[in-house]
Amino acid sequence: MVSRSLLAACSLAAAFCLNFQAQSTPSQPAITPAQSGQPAPAQTKPATPPLQLQDLPPDPHTLTPAEQEQLRQQQILNAAMRLATMQAHWGPEMSTPGLSIALAEVRRTKTPEGTTQITYQITGSGFSPDEKLSLVRWPLNTDAQTMMSGINFDAKGVAVCAAAPAPAQPASPAATAPGTSQQAGGLTAAPAPNAAGSPSIPPAPSCSDTMQLHQPVEIQTTAAPGEAIRVALMDVDRKHGAAVSTVPFPIANADKGCKLEVVLGIKDASLVLIEGTGFPPKAPLKLDLITGPDTRTLHPTTSANGRMVVPILTGAKGQDSGETTVRFGGINHVPTLETSSTPPPPDPDCAPSVSFHWGNGSYKME
């Protein structure tokens, strides 16, 4: 999945650069001396000396295997960070102002395989009563998918099947752009990459194909610990909408008002998001990541409401699975450019820590 993100993003970047060059350097017709009415200048001998052997550019450097591996690892890291950023912003941050949705759990049942199937209904506010919406889901390890259309909200604020959708509209470039999660003024259809260069997004089937009119829209799903259920509702022209995310089986721990939670970024937990809440606002934190005998420290800064989200790549050299513990280590009191004029607050009276498994065999449905 990370590799697909990378390749699609590179394709988009190349296309963008070519388009930008073509638009910013329009061709001009050549004007000859005869056309301009001016006498032709006398031919002069070029003053530039001829090229010498030492002036020739060097042969292109062929990357060594070590350099190729280093480049590949950096590309994977960059793609993983873009993926984590999209996942971290899925929710109110990418919703159109004034619009919101929530997932209301209505039941849990056991499947024949022994896993837990959860059923959600969608509630919302701020949408027009006659507006037809499309349901978008972004499952773990796959692209975002438009599931059905023709949805609106009833008088109780519950999403129901309304009618056949309006004709599908061509997608804007941002809607099919790899790695795009938001455009000016609203939500786009694809927080995960789609095929670059796709001229339009295939229309989703109408909810009336499989549901009765006015029947509540239900989402049935299973999940592993730390797996987020991501849902969005968007209007037909994809200019506005709202998104929501919930974790039915959280990997979390709280202590005296401070909380740390692990959210899967990839099924094998090689990429995870560490979310913290209840910490001092705009404070530089110390997070210790402990994997076996190795410990590394991160220094995320909380937002104005005391929240932070930081992506981490897990793993240990020579191991294909293991366990990592994330531990709050207090406030970072080492002066920085940001804290030299405003000292950080004192350490809060809390010490939450949370552990999770990663690697082969770590993804298990509840």
Image (spheres, rainbow, N blue to C red):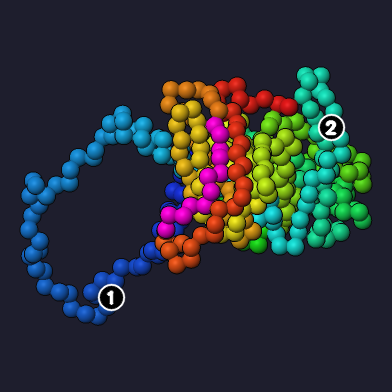
Q: Which residue is drawn at the image coordinates 73% and 55% (left, top)? A: 241
**Front residue of 249 and 343:** 343
Numbered label attached to residue 108: 2
* Residue 86 position (above or below residue 2): below
**Front residue of 29 and 235:** 235
Q: Residues within 10 Å of mark 2 (few under 14, many from 20)?
A: some
* Residue 38 position (above or below residue 187): below
The spot of residue 153 in percent (x, y) is 86, 53
Identified by mark 2, the residue type is: Arg
Q: Which residue is drawn at the image coordinates 92% and 41% (left, top)? A: 212
Q: SS of the residue at dot 2? A: strand
Q: In the image, is 285 to the left or to the right of 247?
A: left
Q: Residues within 10 Å of mark 1 (few under 14, many from 20)?
A: few
Q: SS of the residue at dot 1? A: helix
The spot of residue 47 in percent (x, y) is 8, 64
Res 119 → quadrant:
top right
Q: Which residue is mark 1?
A: 35
Q: Nearer the viewer, mark 1 or mark 2?
A: 2
Report whether residue 193 is seen.
no
Residue 161 on the magenta segment = no
First to last magenta residue range: 324-335
